[in-house]
Image: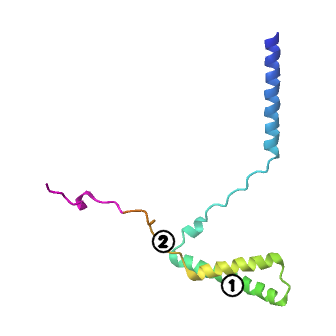
Amino acid sequence: MKMTRFLKCTLAILIATGATALVRAADAPAEPEKRPVRPAVQQMTPEQREAQRKVWRERMQKTVDELKKKKTDGTITEQEAKRLESMEKWLQRMEQGPQPATPAKPGDKPAEKPAEKPVEKK
């Protein structure tokens, strides 16, 4: 008798906790879908990529010029000011070109080949 009551209570608890977990999962916002890597950009030739970068630079420069005009007029909002600052940084990075590859860490030693080791004579 006590065992069946124990099993019934345990089963009721398991069902209740499982149901609340399902309800919480239904209420949780779904993860936004990640944008896929742009295959069109990957399939471009180097000349096409450079042309696309030029278009992006021109578009960004036009927007920066408009925001600078608003700033001089005094009609720029805080959000637009932040956008102007970040776009200016991007333009500066674009003008600098790609960053060089990082060198090896100073602690890394090149691997020695067995033939390079000096042979000791006794």
The nearer-to-camera label among 2 and 1 is 2
> What segment is highlighted magenta in the picture?
110-122
Residue 35: % across, % down: 67, 61
Q: In this rendering, is residue 88 above or below 18?
A: below
Q: In this rendering, is residue 18 above or below 68?
A: above
10 Å neighbourhood of mark 1: few (<14), some, or many (≥20)? some
How far, Cα to Cα, is label 2 from label 1? 28 Å
Q: Is residue 42 left or right of residue 78?
A: left
Image quarter for residue 64? bottom right
Q: Quadrant of the N terminus?
A: top right
Residue type at mark 2 is Ala
Q: Residue at x 21, y 60 (%)?
A: 118
Residue 55: % across, % down: 64, 81
Image quarter for residue 91? bottom right
Q: Residue at x 66, y 79 (%)?
A: 89
Q: Which residue is mark 1?
A: 61
Residue 101: % across, % down: 48, 71
Tell me which label, 2 or 1, sits earlier in the chain: 1
Q: Residue furthest left?
A: 122
Q: Residue at x 63, y 82 (%)?
A: 92
Q: Which residue is mark 2?
A: 101
